[in-house]
Amino acid sequence: MFEKMTDLKPALKKLVAELKKSFGYASVLAVEEHYRSWRVGRSGISIGTDGIRGSGFCIRVHDGAGMAEYSINDFSEEMIPEICAVMRARLFELSRGLGLGKSMGVLASPIPDDSPAVIEKKAVFTMDPEMMGDEAILDLLKRIREKGLETEGILDMLVNCSCSYERKLFISTNRDLDESHMWTNASVVALASRGEEIKDYYKPYSILGGAELLSLVEKDVPEVTSKVLELLTSSPIEPGEYDCICSPEVTGMIVHEAFGHGVEMDMFVKDRALAKSFIGEYVASPLVTMHDGSAVDESATWSFDDEGTLTGDTVIIDKGILRRGMCDLLSAERLGVAPTGNGRRESPERKAYTRMTNTYFEAGESTPEEMIASIAYGFLLENPSSGMEDPKNWGIQCMVNVAREIRDGKLTGRIFSPIVLTGYVPDLLKSVSMMSKRVELSGSGFCGKGYKEWVKVSDGGPYMKARIRLG
């Protein structure tokens, strides 16, 4: 796989060399994605091949004042003269507009860092879904579903699996960045009924790896069926503010939805994020340290972003103090900070935006058992379902499927559902009083910029104790 991209690499370097004769900076991003998905449920089976990322090439040049981009689906060495002509024409049109823009106070685009860097990194996985074949994967998903249907009260079980095998090249005069990785996602949705009442329970899975993930899905079937049947006994919660323990998945939702979007620094440039005014101030408990980047291995881990910026570990909150946000190249230039490697594109034909990657809270020193024992009355929150960000006002509105009652330091067995988390984010984060010792991340979803520009992300953290308003 990826033989075509390997064959094209010398021609891509030749393209950059030819463009460099006319421009101060030139680069090309090349992406090749092989995607496949499988689904088994009551309605039958399906196989999908339409990935999010896709394949293609994005060429960029800079003339010292402005940047021009050109995206194409296919490339060959014979196209180099045509591409050079297109880039000259695009920058000529841009320079005319930029000349007018300067008189109106418009800033030029920054020149990307082109200090020497070489990366060659290959995907690591145990079971290649392509080598297994569609029939073997579908048979395994059917077996998982049938195992779930053996439990009395289960109406249906929908089992999904998807895999993306991607190679990304970034070539400039001084950079040769070449990386491939594979992520695999899976999910199980179980439906149960009692009389006319129907409940569902969704459990996602993710790995920076291959189909070895499915063994974990199969092992968890009894847990999933037990939890959906348990939901049939749930009650509505009395609205109020409670001491709560968030499972790592719920912690991750709070990290991503309640805080992560608010520190994407293109929102600082547009004055659409309250966080811009709180740099250097306490926004959380001293127990809270927040990271984004490639220091962990999950679905969104890459060694460089789609603008050729090397990634790393960005510490956003350090022991409660907001230190910085995450940014792409353009936002960094406008704000006078270094780019963090968060310039990401939905596909080579789309614009680069500041986007989260792997976003999480650091671990603490407690155990979940100690945290439960510390609560006189409150809830253990599990199984997040959705969230909504409000970067301008730092409000939070998230949905959780399960709240387990805690009384006198013990779980009572009583559960409440569904649950809405609301409140002012700094109030919630400043109330954090315990963190567990182990961090868990999940990268089963995608994140949009508003309602579009979807990219792969992961989020998570430890078990977290905080004071939260529930309804």
Image (tube, grey):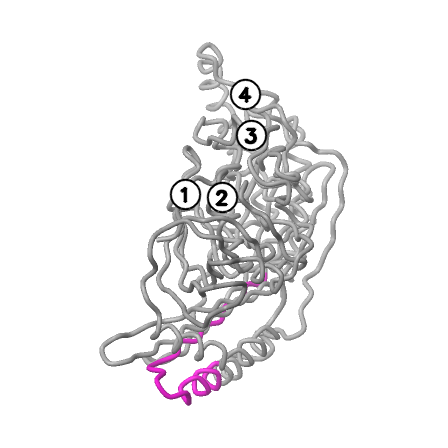
Q: Which of marks 2 and 1 is nearer the N terminus?
A: 1
Is the residue under label 1 in contact with that under label 2 (CB below 8 Å)? yes
Is the residue under label 4 in contact with that under label 1 (CB below 8 Å)? no
* Crowding near the residue tagged with mark 3, few <14, some 14–19, many ≥20 C-alpha atoms within 10 Å: many
In this rendered view, identify the residue nearer to me: 200 or 170.
Answer: 200
For marks 2 and 3, give the CA distance: 32 Å
Residue 95 image point, x, y percent: 50, 20
Q: In which quarter of the image is residue 417?
A: bottom left
Name the amino acid, label 2.
Leu
Name the amino acid, label 1.
Gly
Name the amino acid, label 4.
Ala
Name the amino acid, label 3.
Leu
Front of the two marks 1 and 3: 1
For marks 3 and 4, give the CA distance: 10 Å
Name the residue that disc number 2 marks. Answer: 428
Q: Which of marks 2 and 4 is nearer the N terminus?
A: 4
Front of the two marks 2 and 4: 2
* Crowding near the residue tagged with mark 2, few <14, some 14–19, many ≥20 C-alpha atoms within 10 Å: many
User: What SS does tag 3 mark?
Assistant: helix
In this rendered view, identify the residue nearer to me: 165 or 458.
Answer: 458
Q: Earlier in the sequence, mark 2 or mark 3?
A: 3
In this rendered view, identify the residue nearer to me: 217 or 395.
Answer: 395
Name the residue that disc number 3 marks. Answer: 330
Is the residue under label 4 in contact with that under label 2 (CB below 8 Å)? no
Residue 266 image point, x, y percent: 50, 32
User: What SS does tag 1 mark?
Assistant: strand
Q: Earlier in the sequence, mark 1 or mark 3?
A: 3
Q: In which quarter of the image is residue 182?
A: bottom right
Q: In this view, does 262 lie above or below 233?
A: above
**Which numbered disc covers residue 108?**
4
Name the residue that disc number 1 marks. Answer: 423
